[in-house]
Amino acid sequence: MRKPIIAGNWKMYKTIPEARELVTGLKEKLKETDQVEVVVCPPFTALAPVAELIKGSGIGLGAQNLFWEEEGAYTGEVSPVMLRDLGCEYVIIGHSERRQYFGETDEMVNKKVKAALGHKLRPIICVGETLAQREAGETETLVANQVEKALAGVAAADLPQVVIAYEPIWAIGTGRSSTGEDANQVIGLIRKTIARLYQQELADQVRIQYGGSVKPENIKEFMAQPEIDGALVGGASLKVDSFMAIVDF
Ligand code: PGA
């Protein structure tokens, strides 16, 4: 059985005091983490204080990006070694905002995925289509291709560490979410792709989240779907009440 994972992607929000306030609130409200794994992904600047606050709480820590080298003359970048050092367990890779605004390609995503796994960080690999691609009927080919490229050269033994987030770009931050059924269909296809690249038994172990305008009002619809193993939550993860209502779906 796959344990659902609900992760909050804080994006470029929350100063250190704001991050402390949010995570303190989450800790107070978190009751039972056995049913679902809860992860927060603050901006780099808040990782250390959040790591300190979540010790022993059952909340996991994730970063939102990394660079693939361990160290070196790469001004502005953060390495997998540094993220491990901060206590990160997860790292979001290939978010559509990184692909769109920072020119991340499938090849870069693949390098980052391998670097993360090589340093015992679990990658949350984001894939998803634009509205134009959906309307042109290209969703399935595009998403399967993104998954295949992200996982190129990843050893079968590492696959159970991988989390995939299916995030249709037209649903991110727009308030317009996918339907549970549509998301389930694409996520089922992602699982088939993994089975084709590896084997069914391994594909059945990989957790695949839905992301894109997940809110307290629609989380049940997604979690009721057999292929969907959790959510990557942006906007609604920035407030204690809305994130906890999602976690307690
Ligand atoms: P959203 O963002 O929940 O605000 O749509 C999701 C994401 O970008 O991961």
Image: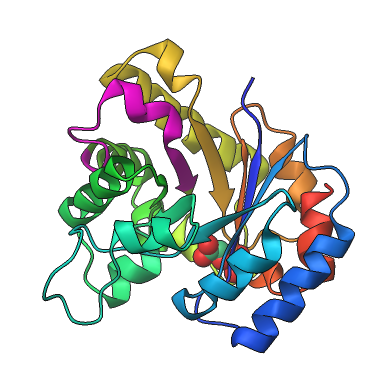
Q: Is residue 128 left or right of residue 229?
A: left
Q: Is residue 172 above or below residue 114?
A: below
Q: Which residues are magenta?
A: 149-165
> Does residue 171 appear in this view?
no
Q: Is residue 36 left or right of residue 44?
A: right
- At horizontal 76% and vertical 80% (from top left) the residue drawn is 21
Q: Total number of numbered labels? A: 0
Q: Is residue 164 shown in magenta?
A: yes
Image quarter for ligand 1 equals: bottom right
In the image, residue 67 lies at what x, y percent?
Answer: 25, 63
The quarter of the image holding the N terminus is: top right
Q: Nearer the viewer, residue 123 or 196?
A: 123
In the image, residue 238 lies at what x, y percent?
Answer: 69, 74
Q: Is residue 225 above or below residue 179?
A: above
- At horizontal 37% and vertical 45% (from top left) the residue drawn is 139
- Residue 130 position by quadrant: bottom left
Q: Is residue 245 left or right of residue 151?
A: right
In the image, residue 127 lies at what x, y percent?
Answer: 38, 50
Q: Nearer the viewer, residue 169 or 63?
A: 63
Which residue ends up furthest to the left in the rendered image? 73
> Does residue 218 appear in this view?
yes
- At horizontal 57% and vertical 47% (from top left) the residue drawn is 210
Q: Nearer the viewer, residue 246 or 74?
A: 74
Q: Is residue 159 shown in magenta?
A: yes
Q: Is residue 222 above or below residue 177?
A: above
- At horizontal 13% and vertical 70% (from top left) the residue drawn is 72
In the image, residue 186 lies at what x, y percent?
Answer: 48, 37
